[in-house]
Image (spheres, rainbow, N blue to C red):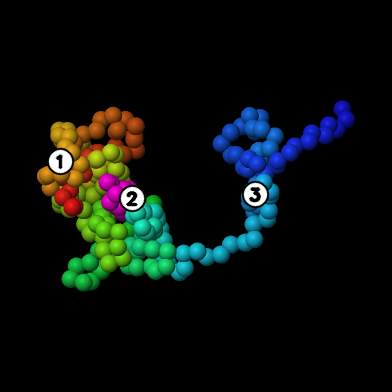
Amino acid sequence: MGEISIEIDDVASVGVVRDTPAHQLPPEAWTLAENVRFNDTSISRIAGETQIFGTPGVAPYFSQFVSSASQPWWLYAGLQKIYAYDGATHTNITRQSAGVDVNYIASGAVDWNGTLLGGIPILNDGADVPQYWAAYSAAQKMQNLPNWTANMLAKVVRAFGPYLMACNITLAGAAKPPASPPSTARRPMAGSKRFIPCVLPNLRRSLPKANLGVERLRLSQCGWR
C-alpha cells in the first residue's frame, strides 16, 4: 500500500491531551510533547528553566499553596521547620515556646500532609500535634491545633466540609479503634470550643489502609476566631 498524505491544519490549536485515548482525539491534538510550548497557534521550543522561588529556608519535603484576597503564599515543611513564602521572602513560621523554635520530628516526605479547613491551613507530620496557621502573615507562627486530645497522633488529617478528619490514630502509642458516637452538627465557626470525635464507618470502607480509627472534628468547635 502506498503512502497516504493527510493534511492537518492548526497543529497548535489543541495542545497535548494525555487523558484521552489517541484514537478519540482530533487530528490537531498531540499525545506527547517534551520541551516545547503551545502558544498563539504555534509550537515553540522552551527557552530553558530559571529559579522562581529563590533559595528555600530548608529543603522542602512538603508544600501547600494558600491565598488570601491580596496575597498568595506557599507553606513548605522540612523535617524540623515550616516556612512561608510570599513571593519575595522565605520566613520561618515554626511553632515556638518562649520565643524559641520547637522543632518537628518528621522523618521524611511521606510523613507530611496538609489540608485547608474553612480557609485555615493545617499541616501534620504524624509525629506531632497537627499545626495550624491562624493568620496569613509572615509574623504568624504555626501553632498546635487547639483542644487536640493529649498524647493522640494521626497519620493523616483531611478537611471534609466543616469537619476535620483524623485518620490512623494512636493514643499514647496504642492504636485507637473508632468507638465514639457521632458528633452533633453545628454551624461552622460558631459556639463551642470543644472537639467531639465520631465514627465514620462508610469512610473507613473507602479508606482500607486507614484501619486504626477515624475521628472527625467540627470546625465550629475550634474557636479560632
> What x and y, as percent, mark residue 53?
46, 64
Magenta part of the chain: 115-126
**With respect to residue 139, does 177 lie above or below?**
above
Could you tell me how many numbered marks the image carries?
3
Q: Which mark is residue 27?
A: none
From the viewer's perspective, is 93 left or right of 225?
Answer: right
Tell me which numbered mark, 1 or 2, is placed earlier along the sequence: 2
From the viewer's perspective, is 43 left or right of 94?
Answer: right
Mark 2 neighbour density, 10 Å: few (under 14) some (14–19) many (20 or more): many
**Residue drawn at (41%, 61%), measured in percent from left and top?**
60
**Residue drawn at (25%, 43%), measured in percent from left and top?**
164
Q: Which image quadrant is residue 177 in?
A: top left
Q: Residue furthest top?
A: 1
Tell me which numbered mark, 3 or 1, is placed earlier along the sequence: 3
Give, as a three-letter code, the residue at label 1.
Answer: Ile
Q: Which image quadrant is residue 15 in?
A: top right
Give, as a three-letter code, the residue at label 2.
Answer: Gly
Viewer-closest of 217 and 124: 217
Tell me which numbered mark, 3 or 2, is placed earlier along the sequence: 3
Label 1: which residue?
Answer: 196
Viewer-closest of 151 and 83: 83
Viewer-closest of 213 and 26: 26
User: Element under label 2?
Assistant: strand
Q: Which mark is residue 40?
A: 3
**Residues at marks 3 and 1, CA–CA distance in whole angstroms:** 54 Å
User: Element under label 1?
Assistant: loop
The answer to whether residue 49 shows anywhere in this view is yes
- Foreground tag (3 vs 1): 3
> What x and y, as percent, mark residue 212?
26, 40
Label 2: which residue?
Answer: 114
Mark 3 neighbour density, 10 Å: few (under 14) some (14–19) many (20 or more): few
**Residue drawn at (31%, 48%), measured in percent from left and top?**
116
